[in-house]
Image: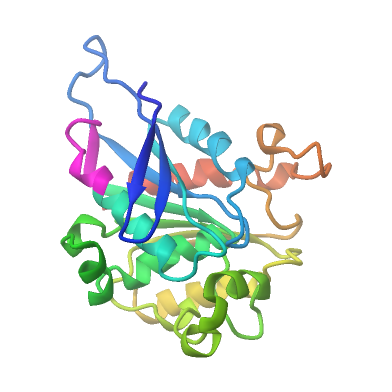
Amino acid sequence: MIHEMISIQTEHSEAKLYTYILSNSPEIDPDRKRPAVVICPGGGYVTTSDREAEPVAIQLNAMGFQVFVLRYSVHPATFPTALLELATSVALVRENAEKWHIDPNKVIVAGFSAGGHLAASLGVFWEKEFLSQSIKVDKDAYKPNGLILSYPVISSGVHAHQGSFNALLGDQQEELREKLSLEKQVNAQTPPTFLWHTFEDASVPVENSMLFAIALRKHNIPFELHIYPNGGHGLSLANEESFSRKNNFGIQKECQNWIEMAGVWIRNLA
């Protein structure tokens, strides 16, 4: 395994990309190409959660995927800083597909909570000129082939998680708040998406995932949506590996199967 930290630099910021890259075995399959997943942990755009980083990466490794965890810039950094870092990271993953034994046509971006907003932002904005002009990379290099959104922040409307948008936008609230309500930005170029949420989520209402799914359906973009009746916000794996002893939170047995379903979804991507 290659486990290292790579500095992701944009014109005005620096992020850290942690690799969890499985080695090919001559005994098993020396030419194996694996899907890759770039994880964006949540944290309201003010931090990036440990619970939604390495525990998820290790689980995805066990399922046979190459994994990367992006510790993107948060407050006081504002939009589009983190998005530029994510696009640069995806381009780097695809650029090194041969070296890292990756299928360049299966590069998935996964995000939790505010990290879900970041992942979805790349999904809806990847073809926009402001991204390619900012990072000087061809659009196809950072186009995600799929999105995995776990209890994502999506809407800046009545169902918004206000803290995330306050941190992300800073003094750009009036200018960008409508633009970053991502259910309104879904288009024919948005990639297929896997979403899951809980009905009881009191921090990021379930309507966020539902609104994104409705927008995907409107544009005939394939999606898979799972809504669990029970469970609070920020479950991550919903098991012992991501359980927060500090807050006595994070185990919800009926939600633990989301990652297996996401793995099947990744393998079935065209």
Q: Residue at x 19, y 44 (%)?
A: 95
Q: Is residue 95 inside the magenta stretch?
A: yes
Front residue of 236/221: it is 236
Q: Please give the name of the residue rendered at 50% of the width and 55% of the height, measured from the top-left corner.
A: 111
Q: Nearer the viewer, residue 187 or 112?
A: 112
Q: Residue furthest bottom?
A: 174
- Position in image of residue 4 (x %, y %): 39, 29
What is the x, y in percent for residue 165?
A: 59, 74
Residue 177 visible? yes
Q: Quadrant of the rendered structure where residue 211 is?
A: bottom right
Where on the picture, by quarter, is residue 142? bottom left
Q: Position of residue 19 (x, y in %)?
A: 39, 34
Residue at the top extreme? 27
The image shows residue 202 at horizontal and vertical percentages of 76, 67
Asked if residue 105 can be seen in this view, the reply is no
Colouring style: rainbow
- In the image, taking residue 125 as reference, residue 54 lies left or right, namely right
Q: Is residue 257 left or right of residue 190?
A: right
Most foreground residue, 152 or 194: 152
What residue appears at the point 41 percent right and 64 percent down from the top-left corner? Answer: 81
Q: How many marks?
A: 0
- Is 54 situated left or right of 185 in this image? right
Farthest right residue in view: 248
Snapshot quadrant of residue 140: bottom left
Where's the N terminus, which quadrant?
Answer: top left
Q: Is residue 186 magenta?
A: no
Residue at x 63% of width, y 46% of height: 236
Residue segment shown in magenta: 92-104
